[in-house]
Amino acid sequence: MSDTSVTSQPPIPLPSQGEIDASCRLPILTLFTGAALWLLLGAIGAMLASMNFHNPQMFADNMWFSYGRILPAAKTWLVYGFGLPAMFGIALWIAARLGKTLLSNSGAIMVAAKLWHLGVFIGSFGILCGANSGHEGFEMPSYAAYMLLIASVMISYFGLLTIHQRNETEMYPSLWFVIAGLLWFPWILSTATILLHVSPVRGLAQFAIASWYVNNLQLVTFALFGMAAGLYFMPKLSGKQLHSKYLAFFSLATLVLFGSWSGLTLGGPLPKWMGSLSSVAAVFVIIPVLAHFDNTRRSCCIKSSAAEAKFFSLSIPMLLLSVLLAAVGAFVAQTHFTLMRTAQSVLLLQGFMGLIALGGIYHILPKVTDIKLPSTKLVRLHFWCAVLGVLFIALPFIFGGWKQGGQLLHPSGSFAEVSKVVLMHIRMASLGELLWVLGSLLLALNVFGTAYQWVRGIIRPVVVEGTSTVASQLEKAGVKA
Amino acid sequence: MNYGALIFLVGFIGLASSWFGLVLAPQLQLGRQPITKIQGGNDPYPSRRLGLAEQGLQVYRANGCVSCHSQQVQQSGTVFDVVMTELGTNQPAVVAALAKLDSKLTGASLSSLPQDVVRGVNKLQADEVNAAFKDTGAKVAVQIRPVGPDMDWGWGRRATVAADFLQDSPVMPGSQRLGPDLANVGVRKPDVNWHLVHLYAPKSVVPDSTMPPYRFLFEKRKIDRHASPDALQLTGEAAPEAGYEIVPTAEAKALAAYLASLRADVPLFEAPMTAK
């Protein structure tokens, strides 16, 4: 655009922050209220799943709560119900705020968000009824996967459109990560949906593709959105400048390169070259995470007065721990098939993605609704529930998994001894699961409290108007009796 | 300063490379894999599971059995055994050859063959032992045997390979071993009834089992005039009160048939071993 054309027209005033937040209101309320509900169900589901280890007889007659059904459902609620909608909401809001532009097609995004939640609803109850696809991490039955795909394409498209229409031409690093995430997620979801559901590939190719998809969802997509949030919120909440744009670019480039190649394990029935390449990549993933850690630690916001700041600061050490475990797991056979793998995914999903998503919800929700959170005390309490919960789940799994792996590698006697170790550590982790149930209750209180006040704020003027006397209405209109 | 295009390109290349590497390449290498042949014969492998077992795969999938059970045996390497199958007519020469070797087999125990001459040696040593008996008239065979913790557990005789999964969809190699590996459970427990009882009341057949019972796959019925021929033979705590019987549903029968059909124990080109 040349300078002359700009000067010939009166400059269009940039939308104010209030207007930007208002444009995000409906889609983000839809995304976040659904996320809060699914997190609660997911935490309760995980708790119920672990009850199977306290008393195996408990759900013996109950199809829905048997371990093999409630566990995939709970994971689906956590990842697809809570994680992705929360991350979408954060990404869209960051895109609008950083571009100093209104959210594009917010009505359509709201429809897509509702479609997404409907897909999660149908898919997760499909899993409970036995429509589990059999691919770990992508248990969604085909019909639900189609709905999620359509919704994610819509959300990504309008998100990218928002960035395209930005008024601030220079892109802050967070936007790079958001763009990459919005492009990559529909890509991997469409690949998985087509190659595992529409026309399933043959034999073990399914396993390779499912592993690739799950890794690219849980590690790459969540890290892209999570790092975008970290780069945006941490300097903002601590009041410091972002240390380096170049370091941010370095972590983006290395994350997409190494992260997207990791996730397949060595030693299984897959051809050796896949596991070897993937394991090397899993070690190199430490690089982008360390770069991000170094970049954000200088703007650490753990001492910020905002209650949600702690979530962002602590999420990055959790990610670091998770990729370190994954790097060890890539080469040490003692971790294979053990609870250590579970610990790694708990640190990634609840530790990193969960904390970022919670922090994001607590930060953004009051802004878009223009209503203060009902209780910031609960936010502080939730922080401790979430962090201690993750540690109480991950630590027993790490130690128990290491023991379990040792026994699996050195068979002595019966398998029952392995089972006993596993049982004890899963029982210990139930405390962490319980903390997550409590935490998600606190989130639900705040989110639904806000939503309730927002709805009341809309309905109240209408009710007041409808129920007031004619005289007072006339008075309002300025007509004197 | 706006590197938008560069950043986009870097991200795109990085992500797309993994799509080519871990989606397209596996599809080209594994997705087109033809049915193979059992090593040393002409039989195609794997053959399709029988109808009920094929349905059972879907019950296995629906109930998330993969959450706790892997179906992939791994091996850390292979070793060789040299087995003497026939003594021949020149016993003194055989005994003399044995004396030169570091073998547990002695002249005194040659009466009952076949017996191992040496076990767990490498290819070179196995060939040497084989050569030592060349002129003695005894018949010895060199056998190849995969080893590893999974073999010590008795979960399989060789590693699971891609060919083992060719007839199944979805494939469920699993990632957890909260329970034992099931790649060869049909070899260990070929009896469908054992599986049915185990599904209904795991502790009744494996006292230390931590597996939750899958009672919802069974029906408890009042015995009318005659008992159902399908009713489970239960004893002890698991048995129902008098006048009642436990009958497996179609799903339970299919699942048990599938479990009994799980076996990946034939020698293949990519997983060599000596067949029993």
Image (cartoon, coloured by chain):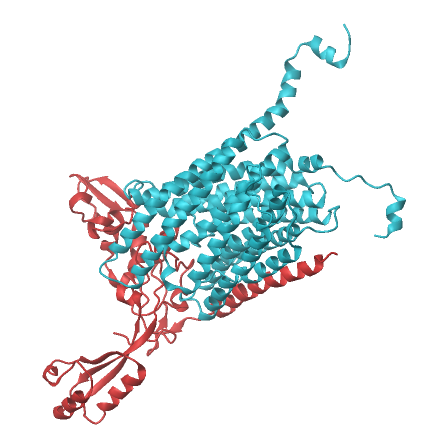
Chain colours: A cyan, B red
Residue A113: x and y in percent read 59, 41
Determine the residue positioned at 37% across, 64% down. A333
Is residue B116 positioned above or below B70 on the image? below
Is residue B27 positioned above or below B225 on the image? below
Image quadrant where residue A89 sits: top right
Q: Is residue B66 visible?
A: no
Determine the residue positioned at 46% across, 39% down. A384
**Residue that protrudes farthest toward the bottom in the picture:** B135
Q: Is residue A367 visible?
A: yes
Q: Nearer the viewer, residue A85 or A259?
A: A259
Determine the residue positioned at 68% across, 43% down. A96
Residue A314 placement, left or right of A397: right
Determine the residue positioned at 87% across, 50% down. A3
Residue A222 placement, left or right of B188: right
Is residue B30 positioned above or below B70 on the image? below
Query: Quarter holding the C terminus of chain A?
Result: top right
Q: Nearer the viewer, residue B126 or A16?
A: A16
Q: Nearer the viewer, residue A65 or A275?
A: A275
Residue B249 placement, left or right of A122: left
